[in-house]
Image: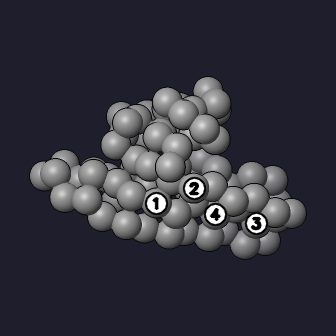
Amino acid sequence: MPIAGFSGTLGNGRRFTGGDSKDQVGLVRAKTGTLNHINTLAGLATTKDGRLVTYAFMADQVPVNAEPVLDRLAAIVARS
């Protein structure tokens, strides 16, 4: 799975760059999905106490792009 800030669709220089998600670079692994007006992010995150957790988020009927919001949600999971 792509690693936030390093590989694949999460390492393209556009993902996990916001102030509320960039501190979780390397701690989030995920598969992205994009269709017209739908964005998804599902994967694994390592929490601050070292637990490995899974998550899945889907944003439907988004006007432009929900990627920054999905990155923020995955970062929140990793910070837990």
Disc 3 vs disc 1: which is toward the camera? Answer: 1
Residue found at the far top of this picture:
13
Q: CA distance from mark 1 to mark 4?
A: 10 Å
- Amino acid identity at mark 2: Lys
Q: CA distance from mark 3 to mark 1?
A: 17 Å
Q: Which residue is mark 2?
A: 31
- Amino acid identity at mark 3: Ile
Asked if the residue at tag 1 contacts the one at tag 3, i.e. Cβ–Cβ closer than 8 Å, the answer is: no
Residue 9 vs 54, above or below: the answer is above
Disc 2 vs disc 3: which is toward the camera? Answer: 2
> Which is more N-terminal, label 3 or label 2?
2
Asked if the residue at tag 3 contacts the one at tag 4, i.e. Cβ–Cβ closer than 8 Å, the answer is: yes
Q: Which residue is mark 1?
A: 43
Instruction: Work out whether residue 55 can be spotted.
Output: yes
Give the number of the disc on residue 40.
4
The secondary element bearing badge 2 is classed as: strand
